[in-house]
């Protein structure tokens, strides 16, 4: 028996290739069932995100045969030539597969080091495999250990504590300036990907008052609906900017949208209550001279890049600590896995039987002290102990017989010497 992890990610293939072998959540149950039969594996799970698609499986066959079956199945399922897929695939087996899976869940293999979304995606992969009944003891235990080490890394290291995107850094900076973001009013200028991400971060931090200004209202409305924001046009910014405590801008304009005079007028209306401004655009959306105003705190994308570079360095330091945790948990899981085929399994079974025995002996001794008939006590002890020891084997035999699993039935009869004369 061996554990295999095979995949394709942002390091090995461009999006044009990755999208060809991604799996739709709606069809994942069917894919898992097909994978079990086509690849001929015991257990299977699939992780499919925008940056990676990975297959995890427990199998008994030769690794070369397994690789061939997987590529052939991916070809068939996605209707993509193997020559397109194979060069981008990476393969891990046993300890390397376990280590890889844990590193992925911890964000150590992500495009953005330490990003937290991958753990949620890994949990979804686990739930989908459970629902598809494609997972048994080994894969279930591996996922549980993986979730455990990911939680340990998040709790005991700083790998996810620092902002490493301009959108996250802008919101993080606002959190340091304003004690309570719930009470601030935010004006977002633009409705592109960066502003959309900023809006998402603000919403997650419970900012209660967000206004989105954009050249076309339709694009802004679609984004604003997701975060409960109001929408205005760019032409309305001069009359609305005085209401904003925070202004974050990122448009594709070739000329500044917010000038020094506009901000001066807004400050007068605000009675010089400070404004925190972040210009994420290149070229700039906010005139450079705005930074000269006393009651304005203006940060550009270059200012944030400096913060991000420092935070990335901090994450890399934390990643070293996280790698140590992953390696420890990998060794621990492999030790448990070896125990399935060694004396550890025998010892566990013996301990279980002895626990049953000890409980029943203690009960029998209490009955004897109560002057119960010794023969009746011994008979009851023997009957209950026999029933306890017979329960698991009997259930397994009945399940194999009722399910028509002849191979398993023959195997169990052999284990329990049922055909010995």
Image (cartoon, rainbow, N blue to C red):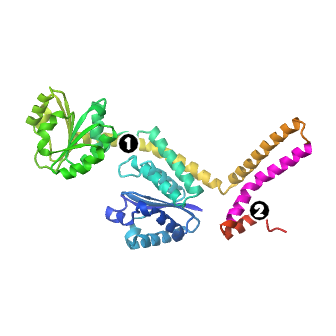
Whether 288 is drawn above or below 132: the answer is: above
Which residue is depicted at the point 20% across and 52% down? 218
Residue 237: quarter of image: top left
Q: Which residues are magenta?
A: 374-400
The answer to whether one can see residue 309 in this image is: no
Which residue is depicted at the point 31% across and 30% down? 180
Residue 349 place in picture, x, y as percent: 72, 52
Q: Secondary structure at mark 1?
A: helix
Whether 379 is drawn above or below 209: the answer is: below
Which residue is depicted at the point 42% across and 44% down? 319
Determine crowd level at label 1: few under 14, some 14-19, many 20+ residues with C-alpha closer than 10 A: many
* Between discs 1 and 2, the one toward the N terminus: 1
Q: Is residue 403 left or right of residue 88?
A: right
Q: Secondary structure at mark 2?
A: loop
Indicate whether residue 391 is drawn in magenta: yes
Residue position for label 1 = 315
Q: Quadrant of the C terminus?
A: bottom right
Please identify the residue farthest to the top as the structure is shown.
271
Distance of mark 1 from mark 2, alpha carbons?
A: 55 Å
Q: Quadrant of the N terminus?
A: bottom right
Indicate whether residue 98 is drawn in magenta: no
Residue position for label 2 = 416
Magenta residues, dominant SS class: helix
Which residue is depicted at the point 53% across and 56% down? 130
Please identify the residue farthest to the left as the structure is shown.
261
The answer to whether one can see residue 411 in this image is: yes
Residue 40 place in picture, x, y as percent: 55, 69
Foreground residue among 35 and 13: 35
């Amino acid at each position: 028996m061996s554990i295999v992890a095979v995949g394709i990610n942002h390091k090995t293939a461009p999006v044009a290739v990755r999208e060809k072998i991604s799996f739709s959540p709606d069809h994942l149950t069917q894919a898992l069932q097909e994978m079990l039969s086509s690849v001929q594996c015991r257990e299977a799970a699939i992780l499919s995100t925008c940056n990676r698609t990975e297959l995890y499986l427990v199998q008994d066959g030769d690794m070369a045969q397994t690789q061939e079956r997987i590529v052939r199945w991916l070809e068939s399922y996605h209707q993509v030539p193997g020559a397109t897929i194979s060069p981008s695939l990476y393969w891990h087996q046993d300890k390397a597969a376990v280590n890889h899976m844990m590193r992925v869940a911890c964000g150590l293999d992500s495009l953005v080091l330490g990003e937290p979304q991958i753990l949620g995606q890994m949990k979804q992969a686990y739930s989908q495999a459970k629902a598809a009944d494609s997972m048994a003891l080994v894969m279930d235990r591996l996922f549980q250990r993986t979730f455990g080490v990911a939680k340990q890394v998040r709790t005991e290291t700083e790998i996810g504590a620092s902002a490493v995107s301009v959108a996250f850094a802008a919101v993080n900076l606002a959190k340091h300036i304003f004690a309570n973001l719930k009470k601030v009013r935010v004006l977002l200028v633009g409705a592109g990907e960066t502003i959309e991400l900023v809006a998402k971060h603000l919403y997650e931090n419970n900012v209660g008052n967000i206004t989105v200004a954009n050249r076309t209202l339709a694009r802004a409305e679609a984004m604003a609906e997701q975060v409960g924001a109001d929408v205005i046009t760019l032409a309305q910014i001069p009359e609305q900017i005085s209401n904003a405590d925070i202004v974050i801008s990122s448009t594709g304009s070739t000329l500044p949208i917010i000038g020094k005079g506009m901000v001066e007028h807004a400050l007068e209306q605000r009675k010089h209550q400070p404004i925190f401004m972040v210009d994420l655009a290149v070229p700039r959306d906010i005139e450079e001279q705005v930074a000269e105003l006393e009651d304005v705190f203006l940060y550009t994308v270059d200012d944030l890049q400096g913060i991000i570079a420092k935070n990335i360095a901090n994450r890399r330091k934390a990643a070293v600590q996280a790698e140590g945790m992953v390696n420890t948990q990998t060794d621990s899981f492999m030790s448990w896995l070896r125990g399935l085929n060694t004396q550890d399994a025998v010892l566990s079974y013996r301990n279980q039987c002895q626990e049953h025995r000890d409980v029943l002996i203690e009960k029998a001794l209490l009955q004897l002290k109560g002057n119960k008939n010794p023969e009746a006590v011994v008979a009851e002890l023997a009957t209950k102990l026999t029933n306890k020891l017979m329960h698991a084997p009997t259930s397994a035999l009945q399940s194999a017989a009722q399910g028509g699993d002849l191979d398993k039935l023959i195997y169990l009869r052999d284990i329990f010497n049922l055909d010995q004369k």
